[in-house]
Image (cartoon, helix red, strand yellow):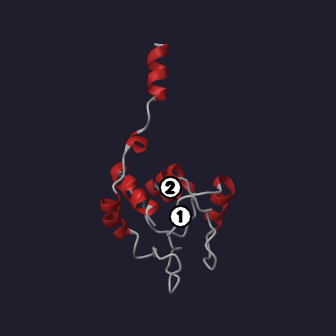
Amino acid sequence: MIAALLLVLSAPSRAQTAVGDAVRGKQVFQLCAACHDIAPVPDTMPQGPPLAGIVGRGIGTVSGFDYSASLMELARQERLWSLALLDRYLAAPWRLAPRTTMSFPGLSNDQERADVIAFLETL
């Protein structure tokens, strides 16, 4: 019984085992492109902060963007956008930042999230 419990607890979740495809991720990213730019320094500030270099970047650190108090609270708790945090955030943004101003409901599909994250890693 204990061995079975240890096996279950040590098994990676499906989100952790999904291998992302950046080409597919670029296609899925079109859901995000209405509000987020991928240029390192966009000509104009879109509704959301630009996402170039987001992997490993400090949360809420794009100069000139007015982040919600909810996202800044997440920044105080987590500090950086890690791959694991991006996965959790993209699954349901409102869970990690309950009063976020981002209206995106999230990507429930593990593979789509892995693909988008693989694409974001290329920026």
At a point 50% along the width and 82% down the height, the residue shown is: 42
Q: Badge 1: few (under 14), some or many (20 or more) residues near its Cα, within 10 Å?
A: many
Tag shown at residue 86: 2
Residue for point 51% across, 74% down: 48
Q: Is residue 9 left or right of residue 25?
A: right
Tell me if label 2 and label 1 are in contact, CB under 8 Å. Answer: yes
Q: Position of residue 57 (x, y in %)?
A: 59, 62
Q: Callout 2: 10 Å neighbours few (<14), some, many (20+)?
A: many
The percent coordinates of residue 72 (x first, y second) are 65, 64
Q: Nearer the viewer, mark 2 or mark 1?
A: 1
Residue at (49% x, 27% y) in the render: 9
- The kind of residue on which mark 2 rests is Leu
The reply, left or right, for residue 17 in relation to residue 74 is left
Label 1: state its secondary structure: loop
> Which residue is farthest bottom?
43
Disc on the earlier residue, 2 or 1: 1
Is residue 24 or residue 73 the one in the foreground?
A: 24
